[in-house]
Structure formats: structure tokens, C-alpha cells
């Protein structure tokens, strides 16, 4: 039976029992629980929280907003900080309540949150506030987020040293339950001692969702007696100004209360102790879980480890560490091993205590007894590595040490040629796709924000960003000593409001030549689209930097008229369209001093969210690519770098199409110099219809077996496609079944088109789960929603040929590399082969789930739940069908679609014939000519349609000659003739004005448009006819929109004039582009004629590569001409090398 009374609100409302909660939610619940505890105690208190977002605490503010009604009812005030140090100062102010007249509360308990850089920044505020003290009925807890691995930070962070430098005690939780418990204990300690207290929140713990047993009724902190109270008192109060006395009160009176409090409340504890002690282990937080998992990998439970001579101590308070209790614990052991991540912290405290004890054990940790490195001070610790260290230690002690098996996956690369990554990148329609571009020869510096992802394109050329709020000030130190005259500095509007204005002020004062590009996108996109923490408009920024002394200010926008009508700007501010970016930047880099370019365009992801809520304009306008006209040149990607531009394979090669479901209506793609773009107004894409599915189909589905015992799952996919939702559903299903679950979602920037992973552990109870991440070879099941993500080290390292079962989706989406290299597409066969090296073939199932979801339900978004259904029916999931379906219902999003997808996945495994019977006979994909005969017939028919039979015959004859010459060299080969046929046909069928007119007026194109979009669409062509004047800001001929209705008759007339082509009557033959195209045909024919006599069996492959070089010459106008010039230069050298090799072989 599943827990039918369980709800999603349990994490907030259940005070006794088991809940499923993540680390951020536990942090927020600390405030709600403290309010409830105070109310029960008859105290009239209020709560306050302020801080600044940043991974791993990037979702604290959104979580607080999501429970705003609960906070209000608990009398807890959330005040987002403008930056970390000001937030800390506001928190300090809450403890001064009774120093002001007419207080309305007995005290205010307060919390601060921020990531490692914020701890560094706020140090001065911490020290001032902490020395002033906490009130007896208030209390302060600092939640500091540490990204040890630097996954979502400019530098990795370990902040306990900085916190301790301000004399603030630190607790270190190992899971979300301990975040809740230690958070409440920290407030209790703060009230008891007058100290502030801190809780260290590392990525793995704060981003973990776990089963937690809570009992608020039993929470009653023990408060040891205080014997040494200074005359001024322990708590915050008005005191005479005396800095040394303030420090003395902290050091001599408050801090000594910490360790008695820790002991009285069992915050540090001996987990188990050996009867015959040999090896003592001390650890805390995440590293404690790693140590437990290491013992598990060695096959040791608590009893087995103790019998072997191992003892384990868990520290909950890592500063000040109760070193006396640690020394007592370690006494009689031979070796004391301190396991902690990053630099030594507890070990140094323990060493200072043990050095006075002649009978202390040998202390090892970062170094062994011989001074050699034992545990890294930089890299994250992995349980497998710790298991080897423990095993080696036991062997040195002469004990029968269990051996750690070698990693199941030694090679974590994707295969030959290095690692194929699904890197994060700007969202579809992101302002940064354009705003981060700079003129040729310019230098640009990055800062904190999404725009840093521009570095991912050319990481070798990227300078690391400075700390937040210091953008551009490093240039002040470089400028006097370099010949570089000017730099651009990117800065987000969130950074500007946080502290960036000070950097601009410093640059103005220094007189350096710099242009600040303030990227105003109306949201803090980096951490989830939160609003900037205060009132800020484009006009406000312009006014501020003008009064600071900026030499010139320019505003560029996708809607400049809005600013001209509504903004109050300084008189000399220029307002223009974003299309003028390159021209404006060239002007600004020549302007001496500090200039400011404000680039305004709303964050694309935020636009999408607001449009769904109906709070942002949603233009009834779409772009469509006519695939026949498209040359596959990729200029649309060059202009927009938009990930909604997708490859489309056709009989005539790879073209482009727009993924309308992900398109955010930026329209930059239409700037590509290509007439294939059609503007569609007044009609949305038709919703793809699935098949009418009778629920009776699922009535007889057999109940599958469940995976027995504890189970580890790795889910790998693309950010934004529901990977995290799937993990949450499986975790909730385990919770509903009464089992314990742990979910750790690796996202970071992944939601921005990158790989995302969900590490899922399911056990019978929470004590059976030690770590958040799956270790080497630990995955029992892989759900590969995306094979590229599944082959990344994060996922591939968890796979085992002897343990892991896998379900993999055949469909392969392009990576961001496709936007910069039109040939960079992952090959499905290669990905499958690589996955087969990591998972045994008999445990691996490949299914084109995306095609099934689209065919059955009309939406590929249903593919993930379909795969979950397949895994469940195969008996690979350790949760019940009833629990999974209830979890889908509790989630409350697209419930019927997701239930149907889940059940169809089950049906596919149970009786796939029923699935195939429902699907259409064809998958709708065009038949691709592949053999030489098929290609020749296809292209010959096309050339007849293009011009006439004479051109078709010319093509056939030339291909025949190449085929015969190739057969003489190698009777079995047709590869050279195939390459020639494809390229020669494309050269002959020049897409001139006649052909483009024929294609755009083709009834088949307009039928496809009618099938794609709803009725009532108003269509316009986007073209740059050579006979019309005008240039775009980039110097190319200006593209214009031409309404289809009046234009179509003209195009039909032009298409009918194709008989003029190749004749002296053709007025278009005089255009330079047409002359070059004719020259290319002649040159290619002559190149072939020169190659054929030199062919041998040994050089056919080289000859084919030489003839295929011309495939790089694609596109229209300036795009094609630039490619042609490169080809002409390169083909001469390539032919020379071919000839030399041919002569040498004779």
C-alpha cells in the first residue's frame, strides 16, 4: 500500500514523521520551525532573512517566495539583499531591536545566506555584527554555500576558514535533515551565547533531496550553565566604544560556551568504536558520508568495521572543534585518519591538541606520516579513493584489509578524438547571442553572469572574470603597460545593481579607455530569472553613469521606440536599434575615456515564463525556413547563435529548420543572408496530434517485478526536458512506498542547453544512504534520455559492464557546437558503440523513444515518462507502479499526458505489437538516395525540373566518365563518382533568382506551410533583391520583407523565365555572383579532367576528398563568395599535393 495521505506540502507541515525535502527547503524551514517553537514557548518573536543568491544557494530566494504566505503567517520577513555585505548588515540590525524605543517583539531571529564569494565580501560586516552580538531572544545563523568543485563558480570555495577568522562557530551538515537540525541548533547556540553561528552548505548537501525523519516536538536544546558572564552581559547591548573589550567578550566569554553546548546536545558523536581499536577516522559533513560509503565499498558495515579495528567519529561543529573529545576518542588507536575535503581545517585543530599528548596516535590526513600527499587538498574526495586509502592503512597496520575493486569504467572519454560534451549555452533568443559580439580586432572582458558562457565558444582566448563588482578594474592595472588601447567590459544589470557601479566609477576616475556593455535583460538569468533586487530601469542607469562622468552613453534595444517614448534620458544619450551594435561599438572604441553601452533586451527564458503567465507581449509572428531554398550554409546560426536552429536532413543534403517549440521569437536568425526565411504572422504552429488511445489498452498490463534491495539510478539528459522532474517523480514514488530516497541533481548551467544528471539512491531507510553522488560503477540502472549526456564523465563513470542495465533513447539532438560548425553533429552509431563499451550489450536497450512519443502522443516531451514506464515494466525500478502513478498525479503538471506516456512505455515492453499497430506505416522521414545509381537518378530528375533535359544529360555524361575512370582504378569502388555526382549536380543547379523564385512559388512549399501553421497566416518573404539599393549595418545588401500575396505572381513570372538562363538574353548573367558560379562549374570540370588520368586504387580516397572540398561553398551572396575565395586558395594547394603524391607512387 502506498501512503495516500502524503502530499507535497508535508515538507512544510509535518512536525513528526518522514518527509521528502531538499537542502534549500530545509534551510527555509529552519525559520518556520523556529517561529513555531517560539510560539509554543509563549515568546513573541519575529523572523528575518536576507542574503544574495548564488550556487549552491541560488534558489533560496525563489523557495522563500514560493512559501511567502507561510512566512507571513509565521511573522518571518524576507528582504532580498542588494549584495552580501549589506544583507549581513541588515541581519546585524535585527539584533539591535531592544536598543530602539517601542520594540514590537521580544526578539528577532535572523538568517543570512550567500555563496563563498559572498562570505569573502561580507567579512567586515560579519565581524562588526558578530562582535556586537546576538540578542537573547533573537539569534543569528549564517548559511554559507560552498562549491568545492567550482562547478558553478569562477573559483572553487571553502569558506570555513574565513568564517572562523571572524570567530563565528561553524556547523557542517551531511544531509538536508541535518541542515534543518543544525540550523535550529545554531540559533539556539546564538541565543545562549550571544555569538552568531554558521552552517556550511556544500553543493551535494544543499542540492540533495532526501527522506528525512523529523520530530519538532522532541527538539529541546540543552543549555549548559553559564558561570562566567561579563559585567556588560553576553548578548547584544549598548556598550561604550571599546574595540578590544568587544573582542575580549567574544574570545573569553562567548566562545567558551560553544563546546559545552555541542557536548550537551550530542552534535559531535562517536558513530561506532572498535573493541580492539587500531584505525580511528574523524570526518564531518559531506566527507562523513563519503567515508561511510568508502567503508561500504570495502564491504564493511558498522559491525564489520568495528570488528576489524576501525572506529568512526562524526563532527557536527567543525569550529571550534571539540578536540578534547576527539583526543579521547582516538586514544589507544594506532592511527587517526582525518577525512575532510579541500584544505586541512579540522586536522590542524586536532594536531594542535594531540601535539601535547605523548600517547596520541599517528595523525594522517592531507599528508601521511612521511609527508607524502594522502588526500587531495584541491580535488573533491571520492568514496572509491577513500576506500583505497583506508584499505592501504589497514594493510600497513597488519590487518586483513578488504580490497577495493578497480573502477568499472577506466576510460571516461567518449572515444577516439576526445570528449564530446553537451556544453551549456545561451537559451534560444538570448540577448547575449548578439550582445556579447565585438568588432574584429577588439578585446572583450567577461564578468559574472550568463554572458560568461561566450567563453565556452573559444575558451583558449578567454580571460577569467574578476570578482563580482570589480568588472573592468583589472584593465586599470593593465592599460598603462600595453599597446592595447581599449577594451569592452560586459556587465549584467544584476551585477550593476549589486556593486558594479563602483567599478564604473573607478574606471571613470582612472581615465582608461573602456566601454562598459551593461546587458540589461530585466532578470537575474544566471540563477533562475529572479528580479533585480530593487528598482532599476535603462533610463536610471543612463542617468547614473552620466552623473558619474561617462564620456558617451548609447542605448541599443530590440524596441528603441519604447525608450524614446517612455524614458527620461540625459539629452546627449543616443538611442538606437540593436542592429547597429557593430557600428556603435566601432565608434565607442575610438572614443577616449569611459563610455557606456546599455544593451536592453529581456532575458529569453524570462520572456517565455512571462508569456505563459500572460504578463509579456507575445507577438503573433514566427519564422519558417523553406528547406528547398536553404543551402545549409549556417549563416543563420552565425548571425543568431540560436539553439532553436536545428539540422534537417533531406534528399539534397543537410538543411536547417526552426524548432518552433523552443523558439523564443527573437528573429535574429532571419538576418542570415538567405532568402529561405518566411515570416508567418497571425498564426501559431499547429499542435501535433497524437493518436486517439483507448485506456482499455492498459487494463490487462501485467504488474512487473520490482528491483530488489537498494538501488542506484543515473538519469542523464538535456536541461529543460524534464530530467529533474523524472528524478523527483521516482523519489516521491519511493517515499510513497515507504522507502528512503536521495536525489542529487547536477544542473548548474545545464538548464541552458547543457547536460543534466540526476543521481538517485533508494534504500529501505535513510541510514542506508551515505552519499549523494553515485560513485564509480555504482549505477544499477541508466536512463539515457540523451546519449551525449550519458557518455559524459559525470554519468559514464557510474556505469559498470557487470552491474548496470541501461535504456537509451536513439534520438540525438545537436550540441551547441553545431551553431559554430555546421558539420558538428553527433553520430548516433558512434554514440551507441561507445555506450556499448560501458554497458554490456545484453543489459542495454536502444529505442527511438522520441519517435514513439511524437507518433503516439504528438509531443517528444512525453518521451522521458515513456522511458520510465519501460524501465518499470522491465522490473528495473525499485518502486511500485501505483506509487509512480500517484507521484505523477501529485506533481500536478500535464497529468493525463504523463500518465498516458508512462502507461504506453509499459505497454511497449509488455506487448509492443499493440504499439506498432497504432503507429502509421511510415515515420514520415524522406527516403534518402544513397547508392550511386539512386543519387544519379534523383539529381538528373532534379536538373530536368531545374532547367531542361539537356542539362540533365550533361550531368549524366560527366558522372559516367568519372565512374568509368574510377572502375579502372578499383572495380568495386563508387565513392569518388558518388562525391562528384552530389557536388556537380549542386554546382549545375545554381540557386539564382529564377530558381529561388520557382522554389518560393512552388505549391508544395505553401502546402507545407498550411500544414505547419494554423489557418489565417499572413506570409512574407525575406529577400535582398540585387536590383534594390541599400545596405544593412553589417555592410551586406539589406533584406526586406515582401508580402506573399502581391509577390507570388511576380515570382511565378520570374520562375517562368528560366529559359533565359545560360543565354545572352539573361540580364542576370552580368552579376558578379553569377559569373563566379559559372567559373566554378568550369573549374570543377577541369579539375576532374586533370584528376581522372592520375587515379589509382591507392589514391581514390584522396581524390574523393579533393573533389568534396567544393561542398564547403554554400549560401548566397557574400556568404557564398567568402566561402568560394577560401576554397579557391585551398584547392590549389590540395591539388598540388595530390599530384605530387600520385607522381611519387608511380
Image (cartoon, grey):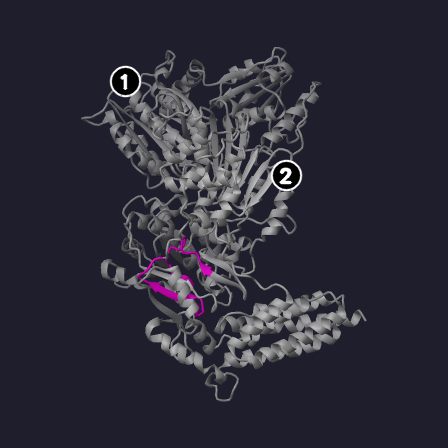
Asked if residue 410 shows in the view, the reply is: yes
**Residue 448 x, y percent position in the rendering:** 43, 47
Q: Is residue 164 left or right of residue 790?
A: left
**Residue 652 x, y percent position in the rendering:** 54, 66
Give the magenta range: 657-684
Q: Residue furthest left?
A: 102
Which residue in the structure is indicated by mark 2?
A: 842
Instruction: Find out whether residue 659 is within the magenta segment.
Output: yes
In this rendered view, identify the residue nearer to me: 311 or 22.
22
Asked if residue 582 shows in the view, the reply is: no
Quarter of the image with the C terminus is bottom right
The answer to whether residue 485 is above or below residue 762 is below
Q: Which mark is residue 40?
A: 1
Which numbered disc flags the more N-terminal residue, 1 or 2? 1
Q: Which mark is residue 631?
A: none
Q: Residues within 10 Å of mark 2 (few under 14, many from 20)?
A: few
Q: Is residue 343 left or right of residue 719?
A: right
Q: Residues within 10 Å of mark 1 (few under 14, many from 20)?
A: few
**Residue 599 x, y percent position in the rendering:** 36, 58
Amino acid at each position: 500500500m502506498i501512503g495516500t495521505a502524503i502530499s507535497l506540502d508535508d515538507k512544510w507541515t509535518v512536525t513528526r514523521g518522514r518527509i521528502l525535502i531538499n537542502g534549500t527547503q530545509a534551510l527555509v524551514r529552519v525559520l518556520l520551525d523556529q517561529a513555531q517553537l517560539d510560539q509554543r514557548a509563549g515568546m513573541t518573536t519575529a523572523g528575518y532573512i536576507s542574503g544574495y543568491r548564488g550556487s549552491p544557494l541560488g534558489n533560496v530566494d525563489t523557495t522563500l517566495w514560493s512559501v511567502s504566505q507561510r512566512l507571513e503567517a509565521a511573522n518571518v520577513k524576507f528582504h532580498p539583499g542588494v549584495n552580501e555585505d549589506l544583507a549581513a548588515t541588515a541581519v546585524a540590525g535585527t539584533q539591535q531591536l531592544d536598543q530602539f524605543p517601542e520594540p514590537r517583539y521580544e526578539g528577532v531571529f535572523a538568517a543570512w545566506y550567500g555563496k563563498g564569494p559572498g562570505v569573502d565580501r561580507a567579512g567586515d560586516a560579519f565581524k562588526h555584527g558578530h562582535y556586537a552580538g546576538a540578542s537573547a531572544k533573537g539569534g543569528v545563523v549564517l548559511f554559507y554555500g560552498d562549491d568545492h568543485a567550482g562547478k558553478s563558480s569562477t573559483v572553487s570555495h571553502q569558506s570555513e576558514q574565513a568564517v572562523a577568522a571572524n570567530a563565528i562557530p561553524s556547523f557542517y551538515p551531511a544531509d538536508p535533515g541535518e541542515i534543518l537540525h543544525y540550523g535550529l541548533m545554531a540559533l539556539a547556540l546564538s541565543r545562549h551565547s550571544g555569538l552568531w553561528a554558521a552552517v556550511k552548505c556544500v553543493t551535494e548537501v544543499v542540492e540533495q533531496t532526501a527522506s528525512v525523519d523529523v520530530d519538532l516536538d522532541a527538539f529541546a536544546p540543552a543549555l549548559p550553565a553559564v558561570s562566567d558572564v561579563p559585567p556588560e552581559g553576553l548578548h547584544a547591548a549598548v556598550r561604550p566604544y571599546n574595540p578590544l573589550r568587544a573582542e575580549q567578550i567574544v574570545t573569553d566569554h562567548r566562545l567558551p560556551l560553544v563546546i559545552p553546548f555541542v557536548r550537551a546536545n550530542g552534535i559531535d558523536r562517536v558513530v561506532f568504536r572498535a573493541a580492539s581499536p587500531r584505525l580511528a577516522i574523524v570526518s564531518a559533513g559531506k566527507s562523513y558520508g563519503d567515508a561511510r560509503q568508502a567503508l561500504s565499498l570495502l564491504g564493511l558495515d558498522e559491525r564489520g568495521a568495528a570488528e576489524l579495528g576501525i572506529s568512526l567519529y562524526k563532527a557536527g561543529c567543525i569550529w571550534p572543534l571539540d578536540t578534547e573529545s576527539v583526543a579521547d576518542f582516538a586514544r589507544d588507536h594506532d592511527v587517526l585518519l582525518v577525512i575532510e575535503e579541500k584544505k586541512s581545517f579540522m586536522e590542524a585543530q586536532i594536531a594542535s591538541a594531540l601535539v601535547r599528548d605523548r600517547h596520541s596516535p599517528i595523525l594522517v590526513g592531507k599528508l601521511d606520516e612521511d609527508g607524502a600527499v594522502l588526500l587531495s587538498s584541491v580535488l573533491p574526495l571520492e568514496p572509491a579513493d577513500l576506500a583505497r586509502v583506508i584499505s592501504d592503512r589497514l594493510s600497513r597496520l597488519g590487518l586483513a584489509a578488504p580490497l577495493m575493486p578497480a573502477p568499472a569504467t577506466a576510460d571516461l572519454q567518449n572515444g577516439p578524438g576526445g570528449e564530446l560534451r553537451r556544453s551549456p549555452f545561451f537559451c534560444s533568443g538570448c540577448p547575449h547571442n548578439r550582445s556579447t559580439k565585438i568588432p574584429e580586432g577588439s578585446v572583450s572582458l567577461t564578468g559574472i553572469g550568463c554572458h560568461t558562457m561566450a567563453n565556452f565558444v573559444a575558451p583558449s582566448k578567454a580571460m577569467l572574470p574578476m570578482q563580482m563588482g570589480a568588472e573592468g578594474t583589472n584593465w586599470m592595472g593593465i592599460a598603462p603597460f600595453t599597446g592595447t588601447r581599449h577594451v569592452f567590459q560586459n556587465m549584467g544589470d544584476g551585477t550593476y545593481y549589486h556593486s558594479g557601479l563602483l567599478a564604473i566609477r573607478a574606471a571613470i576616475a582612472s581615465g582608461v579607455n573602456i566601454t562598459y556593455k551593461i546587458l540589461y535583460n530585466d532578470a537575474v538569468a544566471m540563477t533562475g530569472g529572479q528580479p533585480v533586487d530593487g528598482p532599476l530601469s535603462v533610463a536610471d542607469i543612463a542617468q547614473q553613469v552620466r552623473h558619474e562622468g561617462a564620456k558617451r552613453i548609447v542605448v541599443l534595444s530590440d524596441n528603441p521606440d519604447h525608450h524614446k517614448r517612455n524614458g527620461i534620458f540625459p539629452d546627449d544619450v543616443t538611442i538606437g536599434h540593436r542592429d547597429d551594435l557593430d557600428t556603435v561599438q566601432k565608434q565607442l572604441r575610438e572614443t577616449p575615456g569611459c563610455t557606456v553601452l546599455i544593451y536592453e533586451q529581456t532575458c529569453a527564458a524570462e520572456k517565455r515564463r512571462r508569456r505563459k503567465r500572460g504578463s509579456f507581449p507575445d507577438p503573433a509572428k514566427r519564422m519558417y525556413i523553406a528547406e528547398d531554398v536553404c543551402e545549409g550554409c549556417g549563416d543563420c546560426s552565425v548571425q543568431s547563435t540560436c539553439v532553436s536552429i536545428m539540422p534537417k536532413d533531406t534528399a539534397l543534403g543537410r538543411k536547417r529548420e526552426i524548432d518552433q517549440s523552443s523558439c523564443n521569437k527573437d528573429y535574429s536568425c532571419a538576418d542570415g543572408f538567405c532568402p529561405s526565411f518566411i515570416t508567418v504572422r497571425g498564426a501559431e504552429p499547429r499542435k501535433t496530434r497524437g493518436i486517439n488511445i483507448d485506456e482499455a489498452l492498459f487494463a490487462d498490463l501485467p504488474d512487473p517485478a520490482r528491483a530488489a534491495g537498494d538501488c542506484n539510478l543515473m538519469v542523464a539528459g538535456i536541461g529543460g526536458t524534464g530530467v529533474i522532474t523524472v528524478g523527483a517523480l521516482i523519489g516521491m514514488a519511493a517515499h510513497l512506498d515507504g522507502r528512503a530516497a536521495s536525489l542529487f541533481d547536477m544542473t548548474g548551467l545545464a538548464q541552458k542547453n547543457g547536460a543534466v544528471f540526476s543521481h538517485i539512491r533508494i534504500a529501505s531507510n535513510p541510514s542506508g544512504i551515505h552519499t549523494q553522488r553515485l560513485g564509480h560503477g555504482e549505477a544499477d540502472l541508466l536512463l539515457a534520455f540523451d546519449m551525449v549526456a550519458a557518455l559524459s564523465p559525470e554519468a559514464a563513470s557510474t556505469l559498470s559492464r557487470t552491474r548496470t542495465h541501461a535504456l537509451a533513447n536513439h534520438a540525438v539532438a545537436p550540441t551547441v557546437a553545431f551553431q559554430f560548425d555546421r558539420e558538428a553533429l553527433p553520430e548516433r552509431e558512434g554514440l551507441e558503440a561507445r555506450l556499448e563499451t560501458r554497458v554490456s550489450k545484453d543489459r542495454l536497450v536502444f529505442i527511438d523513444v522520441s519517435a514513439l512519443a511524437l507518433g503516439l502522443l504528438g509531443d517528444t516531451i512525453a518521451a522521458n515518462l515513456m522511458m520510465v514506464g519501460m524501465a518499470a515494466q522491465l522490473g528495473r525500478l525499485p518502486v511500485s507502479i501505483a506509487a509512480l502513478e500517484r507521484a505523477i498525479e501529485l506533481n500536478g503538471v500535464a497529468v493525463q499526458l504523463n500518465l498516458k506516456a508512462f502507461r504506453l512505455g509499459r505497454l511497449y515492453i509488455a506487448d509492443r505489437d499493440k504499439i506498432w499497430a497504432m503507429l502509421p506505416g511510415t515515420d514520415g522521414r524522406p527516403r534518402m538516395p544513397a547508392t550511386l545509381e539512386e543519387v544519379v537518378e534523383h539529381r538528373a530528375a532534379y536538373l530536368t525540373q531545374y532547367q531542361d533535359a539537356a542539362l540533365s544529360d550533361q550531368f549524366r555524361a560527366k558522372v559516367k566518365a568519372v565512374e568509368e575512370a574510377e572502375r579502372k582504378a578499383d572495380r568495386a569502388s563508387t565513392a569518388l563518382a558518388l562525391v562528384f555526382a552530389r557536388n556537380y549536380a549542386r554546382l549545375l543547379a545554381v540557386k539564382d533568382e529564377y530558381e529561388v523564385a520557382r522554389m518560393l512559388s512552388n505549391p508544395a512549399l505553401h502546402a507545407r506551410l498550411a500544414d505547419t501553421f494554423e489557418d489565417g497566416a499572413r506570409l512574407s518573404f525575406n529577400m535582398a533583391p540585387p536590383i534594390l539599393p541599400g545596405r544593412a549595418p553589417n555592410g551586406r545588401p539589406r533584406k526586406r520583407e515582401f508580402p506573399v500575396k502581391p509577390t507570388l505572381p511576380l515570382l511565378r513570372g520570374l520562375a517562368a523565365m528560366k529559359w533565359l538562363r545560360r543565354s545572352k538574353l539573361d540580364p542576370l548573367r552580368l552579376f558578379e555572383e553569377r559569373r563566379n558560379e559559372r567559373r566554378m562549374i568550369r573549374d570543377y570540370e577541369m579539375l576532374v579532367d586533370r584528376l581522372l588520368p592520375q587515379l589509382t586504387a591507392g589514391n581514390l580516397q584522396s581524390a574523393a576528398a579533393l573533389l568534396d572540398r567544393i561542398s564547403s561553398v554554400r549560401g548566397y551572396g557574400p556568404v557564398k563568395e567568402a566561402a568560394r575565395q577560401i576554397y579557391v586558395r585551398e584547392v590549389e594547394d590540395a591539388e598540388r599535393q595530390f599530384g605530387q603524391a600520385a607522381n611519387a607512387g608511380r
